[in-house]
Structures are given as structure tokens and as C-alpha cells.
Amino acid sequence: MSVPLDISAYCNDLGQRARVAAQTLATVRGAVKNRWLLIAAERLETAADAIITANARDVANAPEYGLSVAQIDRLKLTPSRLSAAASGLREVAALPDPIGRVIDGSTRPNGLEVRKVGVPLGVIFFLYESRPNVTVDAAGLAVKSGNAIVLRGGKEAFHTNAALYNVLHETLVETGLPADAVQLVNVIDRAVVGELLKRDDLIDVVIPRGGESLIRRVVSEATMPVLKHYRGNCHVYVDRAADLELAERIVVNGKCQRPGVCNATESLLVHAEIAATFLPKLGQTLSERGVEVRGCQETRRWLPSAKIATENDWGAEYLELILSVKVIHTEEEAIAHINRFGSHHTDAIVTADLATSQRFIGAVDSAAVIVNASTRFHDGSELGLGAEIGISTDKFHARGPCGLTELTTYKYVVVGSGQIRE
Amino acid sequence: MSVPLDISAYCNDLGQRARVAAQTLATVRGAVKNRWLLIAAERLETAADAIITANARDVANAPEYGLSVAQIDRLKLTPSRLSAAASGLREVAALPDPIGRVIDGSTRPNGLEVRKVGVPLGVIFFLYESRPNVTVDAAGLAVKSGNAIVLRGGKEAFHTNAALYNVLHETLVETGLPADAVQLVNVIDRAVVGELLKRDDLIDVVIPRGGESLIRRVVSEATMPVLKHYRGNCHVYVDRAADLELAERIVVNGKCQRPGVCNATESLLVHAEIAATFLPKLGQTLSERGVEVRGCQETRRWLPSAKIATENDWGAEYLELILSVKVIHTEEEAIAHINRFGSHHTDAIVTADLATSQRFIGAVDSAAVIVNASTRFHDGSELGLGAEIGISTDKFHARGPCGLTELTTYKYVVVGSGQIRE
């Protein structure tokens, strides 16, 4: 008879340890955090054999968890993928330290010196699925930004994550950082997640990454703030003043370059004035690339092979080679459609007209609005933030890619010489 | 028989109007918003008679609502108080527009132009108590920052708020801004609040101001983010290296200058090495100012007239002329006490020692950490932000005073010339 695990005590212990580690981590110098990142990167490479052996166990178990071939491929670690994860840590080490940065400041008329200074959020609870490099990325970003992190990976990557965690944990101890700065939930029971989501006294923010249903469940249970996006239904609107060759390149790249990610293009809006020229040629290219088109009635006039789109298609995040297409008659209609059916993630316009681009930028209520480029550029690294832990479609705290800075808050530091208020 | 109000329909209508107004407001030029602020300011002054007559009705009803003499004084409008509210709007007009400000930006190696641009949050639901100038302040800050606002004042200020709202509403229409940019909940039934707190599809953020129990109720019911502080238990720690004359001035100012506000000093920590010199003299001054001292055993050795403090006193926000006093033996003990019993609002140290001040600044986990000045300076205007809608002790989104910038979020604007991802 196995002793039942006391979930509440387990979570309390985990959270308390994280809280204590976060207090220490908040005032650790940048050089120490960078030293850990570089040593951990090196050790991941020297421990490659052990990590890949552990990963092989997960890969062997994958069919049992019902993983698809594509999912198994994403789960699989190779020496080059492990090196890429190590390089990620080295890149984080090279980024500026967000802690202690002076965001703003002034000297007041009464001589008070006011500074707004970057400080960590505290404890991050991170939930994510299969890809093992995410374990390494998240730990690196959290520690560099002065936060303790509690990692909860998918059960399908259990042994891989444990092996990666061992390296991260050993090197934390070795470099004199708090051993509990990075912790891994090693209990598969889902009750652990529910229990941790209750503890806003111990956890400052939860970051869930995965399918929409997982994220909705986390949002409904969490007592602390959640950094998240539900889905990415990204639009490209091809304006009547678009360069059509350029438009085709942008649509095809957005749809085909990596269809399974949140910034892939899912919906195309085409201005009626250029539909007759644009759609037949685009349809030919998409067909060659194996893309299924689901269009409105007017689309099917110019692209008879397209399936009929239903209302559900306008809001869908396919994550595969399917594209919804709608012919619209004004820019206002395009903007209204995007704001209604989109996911406020990434929406693009292709146009040569400056005023049209300005109206689109102003009125589309999305985390990233793109003019004349692929939606695939909405990414921390592509936008110049460095590595990211996720993309937010919320308006509160952080919007768009969440890198080091987005994992911090600030405090006001006010230094005087005896000032009082009259 | 009166027809029962359909609360759900009422709230839906209110929220939908606010949402539509917010969409328009998001792209209104700064000059138009400033014009409204200036006209509304003028009109508040010319409508002074009507507003003060309405206020007199509330003042007459005040005893019925059980308001204290101090509360009635706060509720009462005079021509000079109304002029002060009008001046507040003029000051907001003079502040830089947070909408469209470029927060950050770069040109990427592939030529993509990336800008991070300030945009409104959307719709603000603001709950607050008696002081009528808050109605005017909040409306001004919301509109200037491009947000629609739904105001819910206390029932004790019902007629005053309606009169103020009339002026704000008329001038919105007159200047061509959306009439629903500012709305006032004119139903006293508390069910309206519960219903609006469910509508995260219509409201982007709720800002409650008032007692801790009100705020806790809002947090537990709200489905959208809440910008808030529960209470202000602000500490002054007098270090052994303090200038004692300066320390006394700071403690007396923090406690006595305006005892009923959140940044008033509630708790004093005194280093044991200077307790014998500092406490008797301070005790004399506090006694002359009518302050009741509640101290630990060691405090009472030097201040025998002090009452015995209980554990509850360490966490209390008195909001009146009472001060808790504790003698501590190390800086670490002071920091630990503040982080445990404080409210993460405003905490000050008095010291002449630079390293001591640096350790205190680093380790005290509060929205504002103050060195050698009164806790009363934690205020948007005093810290250079201009007017504020409240103070946040949260770490997510905004911390400290919440002025115009804190009522905004941002979007990424990316302008290219046909870039695709390889």
C-alpha cells in the first residue's frame, strides 16, 4: 500500500521554498546570475548523454500518451537541439540585466531624488507542454530576471525534464545561487496544479503555455495574475493599394513557414477591388503548397476550388495548412472583422498607401499590428527583446512578447535629506 | 407598484456604451481631449451654484447615512473646493498625452521598423467613496488617457455626483467627444456592482477606492484585473545612524500632517542603540500633538506612558492619531518586520549611513521605499507623475501612484517592406 501524497503540504513546501529563494535572488548581482547561465549551458552539453538517455524513455512512452508523430518529433532531443538550448542560455546571459535598471527618475523641486527602479515579480509558476527546450529557456529567463520559478512540464516529457532540472539545480548550488530558484513539480497528479493556483500568497504570477482549454482552466482557477494568450487567429488584410506580389509572399510565408505556431496566419481578408487579380494567382500557389482554402461566397467566385467557410472559420486557429479567406469592401469592414473575430494577437495589412496603414495601425486592437511583413515576426527575438517566455494578448502588465523586462515590476526609491510635507 | 429594474440589462447597456465610446476615444487627438478638460474646468466653476445646491442635499442627508463629522466635512463642496477640482482638470490638460507615445523602438537587421506605442486600456470601472473632487479627477484622467470610465460613487454623494456628471457629460457632447466616455451609475442597488464585475467582456480594469473590506469584496468578485491597495501600514525605521532631530520631524510629519490617508505613518521602528535618547523626546512631542503611542515592552521602558501594543497593532492601519512603536536590534530585524507586518505600500528609513540605506532599499518589498523623508511623499503629484487615480501595491501592471501612464497599455507596431521569415 503506497502512502497517499499530501498535496497541500507538498505545494506549501514547494511554494515556501520558492518564496525564500526569490527573496535572496532579488538582490543577487548580475554577474553571479550570468555565471550560472554560462556554466549551466556548458553542463547541459557535457551531460548530453544522460539527458538524451532520459529523453529516449519519454520518446518510448510517447505512443502510450497518444502523441502524434509531429508531437513526438517536438519531444525528441538530439545533441544539436540540446546545444541550441544551451546557446539560448548564453544569449540570455548576454542580455542587459532588467533588475536595478532605472526606468525613470527626477529630482523634485524640494530636492527629493525620485527613481523608478526595476525589481523582480517574485515567484513564477510556469505550466507548459512537450518541447523540452522550453524548460531550459524558462529557467534561464526567470533567474536572470531575479525570479524563482516553479516548472510544471507535461507528463510526456517527465524524464527529460527531470534530467534537465538536475543540471540546472546542481549548477545553481555550485554558483552559490539559491538551490530553490528553479524547482520542478515531480508529481504528475493534476491536483498539484489546482492547489498551487490557490496560493497567491506564495506565487506572484502564473504563465500557462499550451492549448486554449488548458489556459482557460488555469485562468478560471488562478487566484494570482495570469500572463497568457488563448490563441492566435492572425489576419492578413490585403488592401486595394497593395503590391500583390509582395502580398502573396507575405500570405504564403505567414501560412506555410511554420503552420503550428501562434503567429502563423490563419485568416486572409482581400479587398474586393483586387480580388479578381489576386485570388486566382494566390489560390494556385496555396494549392501547390498543400493549403486548404475556406472562403466566403465572393472568394469562391474567384477561387472555385475553395470550400465554403462557416462562421466558425472566421474565429478559428487552425495550426495547420488551412486558411480562411473573406472578400471585404472597405478598410473599415476589414478592421471591424479583425477586432470581432481575431484574437488580438497579430494582425497585418499589406498596402502601399500611408494613410490606410495609419488608420489600420490606430484602429486594430491587437498586441502587434504589422504593415507589409509576415505575421510570423511577432516574436521576442525578431522584435529585438531577446528570448521570451510567451506572448501576451492581455492589456494589463505586459502585451506582446514577454522577455526579461516583462518578468519584472518596479519600485519607487525616494531619497531625501529631511523633507516633510507642509 | 414600481417596475423592478432589470440590473443585467442596465449593466449591459452601460458597458456596451462604454465599449463603443472607448473605441472612438482611442484615436481622438490630444488637442480635442485637452479642449474638453479646459472647457469642463471652466463650466464647473460657472455651474458652481447648481453643484453646491445639489451638494447641500447630500450634506443634509449625511446624518441619515451615519457619516461622522469628519466624513461630512470631506463630502462638503465649497466654491474654493470646486475651483480646486477645476484646477485639477487644467493640470491634467497640461500633462503630456500618454497615447501614441513611443516607449521603445528599433530597426531590426532585416529593416523592420519596430515601435512600442502607448494605447488606452479601454474601459475603466471606478468605485469610490465620498469626496466629490474624486469624480472630477477620475473622469479627467480617464479621458485624457483615452479610456471610457464608468463611475460609481457612494450613495452619500449621490446628488453631488449627478450634478458634476451633468457638467462633464454636456461638455463632452459640446466638444465632439463620445458622450459615453464618462458614465455615472445612477442606481444605488449594490447588485449593479456585482453584475458589472462579471463583465470582463466589457470592462478592462476595475479600480476600487475605499475601505479594505470593500476592496476585498471587489477583488473576490471581479473577473477583470483590479488596480488597488488594501491598506497603507507605512513604517518609519529610525536607524542607529540617524540624525535624531531629522527623524523626529519625519515621524511627526508622517503621523500628524494628515492622519486619515494611506501614506500616513502608522508604525515606528527604533534601533535599540538610540532608543534611550530618541524615544523620550519623541514621546513628549507626540503627546503634545495628541498622538496615542502603543509600544512593545522595550518602548515602554523609555516611554512609560505608552500603552502595550498587541500583535494586531503591528499590522494596523489606524488612519488616526495612534502610532505603534517597536524597538528593534538590527537592520535585518527591521526589514523582516516591515516585510511581514507592512502592507507593501510605503516604508521609510532615517539614517546617515549610505550602505544601511542601500540594504534597506534593496530588501524592503514595497511600492515606495523612502530614505530620510516623510512617508507622506508617496503620491503621484509629489513624485512628479501629476494627478493620480490611486496607489497600487500590486506588482502586476502598475505599482505605486497610478497616473495617466498607468492607465495605458501598449501595442507593437511593425512596419516593413515585404519581409518574410526564412
Image (cartoon, coloured by chain):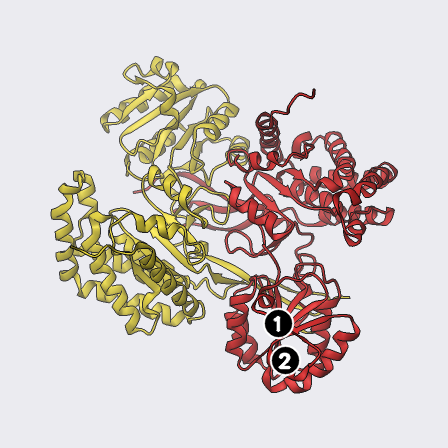
Chain colours: A yellow, B red
In the rendered picture of this protein, how many numbered marks are placed on residues? 2
Kind of residue at disc 2? Thr
Q: Position of residue A196 (x, y in %)?
A: 37, 53
Q: Quadrant of the C terminus of chain B?
A: top left
Mark 2 lies on a secondary structure that is: helix
Q: Quadrant of the N terminus of chain B?
A: top right
Q: Give the mark toward the camera: 2 or 1.
A: 1
Disc 2 and disc 1 on one polypeptide chain: yes
Residue in view at x 22 percent, y 48 percent:
A155
Nearest the viewer among A203 and A334 is A203
Nearest the viewer among A111 and A176 is A176
Relative to residue A115, is residue B57 drawn left or right? right
Q: Is residue A186 above or below residue A109?
A: above
Mark 1 lies on a secondary structure that is: loop
Q: Is residue B132 visible?
A: yes
Q: Are marks 2 and 1 in contact (CB under 8 Å)?
A: yes
Q: Is residue A309 above or below residue B14?
A: above
Q: Position of residue B122 (x, y in %)?
A: 57, 38
- Residue under circle 1? B309
Q: What chain does mark 2 sit on?
A: B
Label 2: how many residues lie within 10 Å, few (<14), some (14-19) or many (20+)? Answer: many
Q: Quadrant of residue B38?
A: top right
Q: Quadrant of residue B350?
A: bottom right
Query: Which label belongs to residue B299?
Result: 2
